[in-house]
Image (cartoon, grey):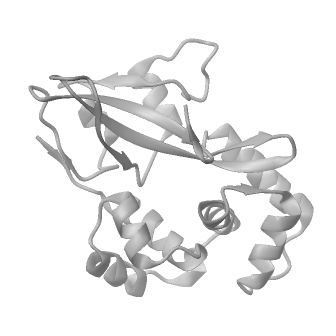
Amino acid sequence: MKITLNKEAEQEIAKLAFTSTLTLNQLAKKYGLTAGRLSTLKKNLATERITTSDWILGSLTSQPKSTVQQIQEYIDFKNRDLISTDELRETLELLHSKGFVYEDSGNWNLSERTIELFNHSDERLAGELTLAHFNLENMKAVFNPPTDDPLMYNGYELNSNNFKHLNGAAELEFNFEKYSYFLACRQGENAI
């Protein structure tokens, strides 16, 4: 079984190529693409489609812990002027409500959604892939998280029935006979 990145997921990764200070190779490896494919996607993507949210996610990808002021300075450095502090805060709150960022002691941090693979033989972590696309509302409908985990920060097991709901968020060969798979969330520099 294989999931292939859909167009929306590829565009999200390509936007990060504009807004992050990570190299194309670093981004490609992180999201399971080839550097050549990412380069092509970046060339095909019009920069007008990059939003304030994209700049913030790019900033947090480069600097996992950032204050609103640091994010503003990053955006200014990237030549995207005239974004007010209020607009930044509203965008951060919107991203928080979708589970993409969280706030901790005045710092905003990126919440990355990942698929973790564990070997059946020794139960060790065999791999991890960052998702290129994550729709919180869709995932909540599939996994029905408990009320104390509304942003799905806990791990959720993937199986042969529910993995297809990732809807092209990752390119991955699934082998349920050899591995266990979990939808997980890594916040900032520390895994949950």
Q: Residue drawn 51% across and 36% down?
A: 185
**Quarter of the figure with the N terminus:** top left
**Residue 47 location (% of width, % of height):** 56, 83
Which image quarter is the C terminus in? top right
Tell me where residue 89 sits by quadrant: bottom right
Against 57, residue 104 (above or below) is above
Corner quadrant of residue 51: bottom right
Count the marks: how many? Answer: 0
- Looking at the picture, tell me which residue is in the foreground, 131 or 86: 131
Position of residue 72 relative to residue 81, above or below, is: above
Q: Residue at x 24, y 35 (%)?
A: 164
Where residue 48 sits: x, y (%)?
Answer: 59, 81
* Left or right: 29 as drawn, with respect to 174: right
Q: Quadrant of residue 85?
A: bottom right
Q: Is residue 152 above or below residue 174?
A: above
Q: Residue at x 45, y 33 (%)?
A: 184
Residue 154 x %, y %: 52, 24
Residue 124 on image: x %, y % = 28, 29
Q: Residue at x 40, y 23 (%)?
A: 156
Q: Is residue 77 above or below residue 136?
A: below
Q: Which of 148 and 8 lies nearest the eye of the viewer? A: 148
Q: Give left or right: position of 163 versus 152.
A: left
Horizontally, is 132 left or right of 125 in the view? right
